[in-house]
Amino acid sequence: MINFNVPPVVGTEEHYIAQAIAARKICGDGAFTKKCNAWIEEHTGTAKALLTTSCTHATEMAAILAGIREGDEIIMPSYTFVSTANAFVLRGGVPVFVDIRPDTMNIDEEKIEDAITERTKAIVAVHYAGVACEMDRIGEIAGRHGLIVIEDAAQGVMASYKGQALGSIGDFGCFSFHETKNYSMGEGGALLIRNPKDVERAEIVREKGTDRSKFFRGQVDKYTWVDAGSSYLPSELNAAYLYAQLEQAERVNENRLKSWRFYEERLRPLAEEGLLELPYIPKECTHNAHMFYIKARDLKERSRLIGFLKERGVMAVFHYIPLHSAPAGRQFGRFHGDDIYTTKESERLLRLPMYYGLREEDAKQVVNAVWEFYGK
């Protein structure tokens, strides 16, 4: 069976974990955590990056720093992971879902403004598959209405929009380093902060509401509880595992892009015949080969294709169930406007195996199975 995902390993992870253990510093904010933060800052240009225990927690921190309170509305796509909404629901916020673009599966930037009310506080741009949302338009809308922009760049490490790293464009950006992502620490994430004025409070929120970070820098002689917060620091062991991969980020990225291009080139004839659809990458976007998906004709065909591929030793999966159709989505949020594409496109999309180190012979097996399904 060709697995859908294999967590990345570059070869130096165990060595770095051993170093962390030898240093007798395995809790958060040790040397490897700082190296990861510095790498993100250098490669994205963000003012500050803070490694977290998950992208979920990074988004929760963004919600706190954005000042989300009971009844505040946050505009976002329904086609996203539950954490995008949960981070705001936990603070009493109301997710307002709008339709997506069928080409990129990202939020339709032209549907945002009509959803704005006097309660709207923020816009969440989810960069699906590491392909950027239309950030110029989103930023322009946010600027005119005084809204905060939060980038859910869980899938966006090493991707960019008009040359600017995803996660560094909005007020706050959120990365994921889950084992299904291009770079992994098992469970983990990072918060990117654009404005330096937000950094001190972010450190406090991340450190259980204390000014412990200032204490370790010698800025205060003791630390104490100064704000509401939680524990969002990952273990040094996790950070050591991640740093090994960040050092090899270009190698990992190129390897994934090679597999992505292999799929695209060999499935293009089926798309040209109108049998399926392939991913669309706008010219202003540089993607990171986070995933390769195809779109079948409809839900029924997709279900048959999944079963067909499994019979031929290929594990392929569908993706998100739109949040507005879920029980919690109906309870905590609402969909604004018409659901023209969100449900329809989500029922067509199928993700093919994609991971660092995917063998070309396995990718060929995947492609051949897809061709066989379509009678070619």
Image (cartoon, helix red, strand yellow):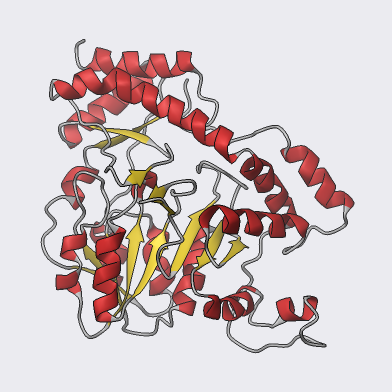
Residue 56 vertical position relative to residue 238 in the rendered view, above or below:
below
Q: Please give the name of the residue rendered at 77% of the width and 61% of the height, measured from the top-left corner.
A: 30
Looking at the image, residue 216 sits to the left or right of residue 314; the answer is right
Q: Position of residue 91 (x, y in %)?
A: 42, 79
Q: Position of residue 353 (x, y in %)?
A: 42, 29
Q: Quadrant of residue 113?
A: bottom left
Q: Which quarter of the rendering shows the C terminus?
A: top left
Looking at the image, residue 100 sits to the left or right of residue 351; the answer is left
Q: Please give the name of the residue rendered at 29% of the width and 50% of the height, measured from the top-left corner.
A: 321
Looking at the image, residue 160 sits to the left or right of residue 325; the answer is right
Q: Please give the name of the residue rendered at 54% of the width and 32% of the height, measured from the top-left corner.
A: 6
Residue 186 vertical position relative to residue 232 in the rendered view, above or below:
above
Residue closer to the observer: 116 or 81? 116
Residue closer to the observer: 74 or 311? 74
Q: Quadrant of residue 333?
A: bottom left
Residue closer to the observer: 256 or 176? 256
Q: Position of residue 165 (x, y in %)?
A: 45, 53
